[in-house]
Amino acid sequence: MPNLGVNIDHIANVRQARRANEPNPVSLAFLAELGGADGITVHLREDRRHIQDKDLELLRKTISTRLNLEMAATQEMLDIAIRTKPYMVTLVPEKREEVTTEGGLNVISQKEYLKEFTRELQSKDIPVSLFIDPSLTQIDASNEINCKWIELHTGKYASATNTTQLSELSIIKEATIYATSLGLRVNAGHGLTYQNVEPIASIKGIEELNIGHTIISRSIATGLKEAVREMKLLILNPREDRLINS
């Protein structure tokens, strides 16, 4: 069965909405690990809309599992990755106007550039994964680039209707079989939830699922009652030694 990489970008989204100090994605990464996460995934975007450079540096120093850095294939990000040395880099497409990553990387259209970019990272002992749609032609292009891994985009499967979901699942299965036959290692992710993850988790050959939004959403639901209770107790029973200028 696949490992679980927990994407903590949405924790940083909440923090950045107020430019506050909390919630701290670095601290909460420890809770994800305690819950069984096999790795922590973050996307350092060019516009720094959620994860910040400092988060990345602290995560690299403090987590006890594996750090997967998602990033665009730019010179700035290349320099950051080489300096930080995460366990793995996953190259993803990036548009400033998008809410979340909308699709896989088009490896075919930029094969030579990505080949050199990948070579530079892997020469520094940083394995590279390419986030691609489950397309056999994109898999072929990824293999020609000599990356170690691919991550199959599961977004179409996740958003499929009941009548098309089985077809999308079959496409991911076929892509996994084909990629592993070429010697590529396979991860998968995007849009997976508690309701749709099991068929993907059952596919032989997929080594890790990267999941974020649904886990962070569930954590708010499961933890909200206790968080409100604790705040209510502080309001009803304030401790005088905590009063300012008392």
Image (cartoon, grey):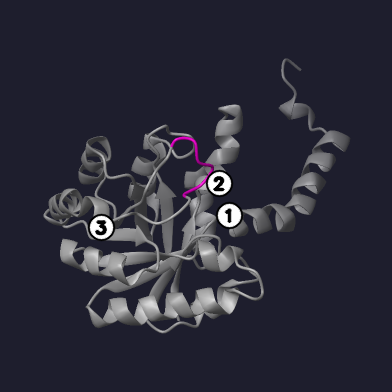
Q: Nearest the camera: 66 or 82? A: 82
Q: Is residue 22 visible?
A: no
Residue at which label 3 appears: 108
In the rendered structure, which disc, 2 or 1, sits on the residue that comes first in sequence?
2
| 212 lies above or below 51 | below
* Residue drawn at the location 79% of the way across and 28% of the way down: 240
Residue 122 appears left or right of 184: left
Label 1: element kind: helix
Label 3: element kind: helix
Residue at which label 2 appears: 10
In the rendered structure, which disc, 2 or 3, sits on the residue that comes first in sequence?
2
Query: Type of residue at label 2?
Result: His
Residue at which label 1 appears: 213
CA gap, disc 1 and disc 3: 29 Å
* Residue drawn at the location 18% of the way across and 52% of the way down: 121
The image shows residue 134 at horizontal and vertical percentages of 39, 68
Q: Residues within 10 Å of mark 2 (few under 14, many from 20)?
A: many
CA gap, disc 2 and disc 3: 30 Å
Query: Type of residue at label 1?
Result: His
